[in-house]
Image (tube, helix red, strand yellow):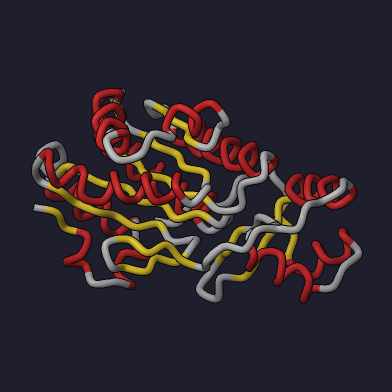
Amino acid sequence: MTLQPDQNSELLNIKEAAALLKVSEASLRRWTNSGRLACMRLGAKRERRFKREDLMAFMEDRAAPQAPPASRPSEVLLEGVAIEYGNHICTLYENDLGRLKWSVPFIQDGLRNGEGCLLIATKAVREEVLDHIREVWDGVPEAIEKGQLIQSDGIPDGEAMCRFVEQSVMAATRAGMRSFRLLGDMSWCLELGMSYDDLLAYEVRYNHDIARRFPLVSVCQYDVRDFSGPAVLNALKCHEDTFNYSLSRFLAS
């Protein structure tokens, strides 16, 4: 299943974007690689495509005085696995302890490193994750207050959910953050009454419209007690980046 980009948003190729900004294509590649400029990657060759509104916002930011950009690594190291920015992966767990294996260190390390972190889960799961982080780090209240840690119960409309993530990342970028992590514990979809078909459509839309557009590592974790075998299989198919790594590392017993 392939989801087409939003037809209401004009996409420019790298030549058109360079002409609009009056810069070289090499500059655009450098800015997208460093995370300064958002772009989408389409097709097997992952060719860059740019939203006009992102380019206009970038022009405005360039016109304002800029502090020297902070350097950031090109990947996230978690549980011994180096995950590149732009990856959208799936983890599976089968008990309450397994739910914490990835979620706690993933969000905790991101907050400690000054990255923008989005935690999308039911209220109970969010509280469980943050309680474990608070036991070893006292910066959670400050991270929430300054907008570094963004929480959500989820939105049962996939398009609206993608829009929320996009707007959250753009706002955090304007606040000075240059890299991001998103953890979605996908049982939120069931709590809000989202059907399996709608969930699948959301994952596909997110993968094509959001995941590769920003310097963002996205982890969607599924409780196999809540989802059927076919639903879990389809979830894995929607997270093709997972297969770039040893799949056993993403299974928590």
Q: Quadrant of the N terminus?
A: bottom left
Tell me residue 68's x, y (percent): 75, 58
* In this picture, residue 244 sits left or right of residue 49: left
Residue 53 drawn above or below residue 249 = above
How many numbered circles does the render carry? Answer: 0
Tell me residue 156's x, y (percent): 39, 27
* Viewer-closest of 144 and 30: 144
Residue visible at 17% across and 42% down in the picture: 223
Tell me residue 57's x, y (percent): 79, 45
Residue visible at 64% across and 41% down in the picture: 170
Tell me residue 171's x, y (percent): 64, 37
Residue 48 drawn above or below residue 141 = below
Residue visible at 78% across and 52% down in the picture: 67
Residue visible at 33% across and 72% down in the picture: 244
Classify residue 169 by image quadrant: top right
Residue 244 drawn above or below residue 216 = below
Classify residue 88 by image quadrant: bottom left
Residue 214 drawn above or below residue 183 = below
Q: Is residue 252 visible?
A: yes
Q: Is residue 186 visible?
A: no
* Viewer-closest of 224 and 145: 145
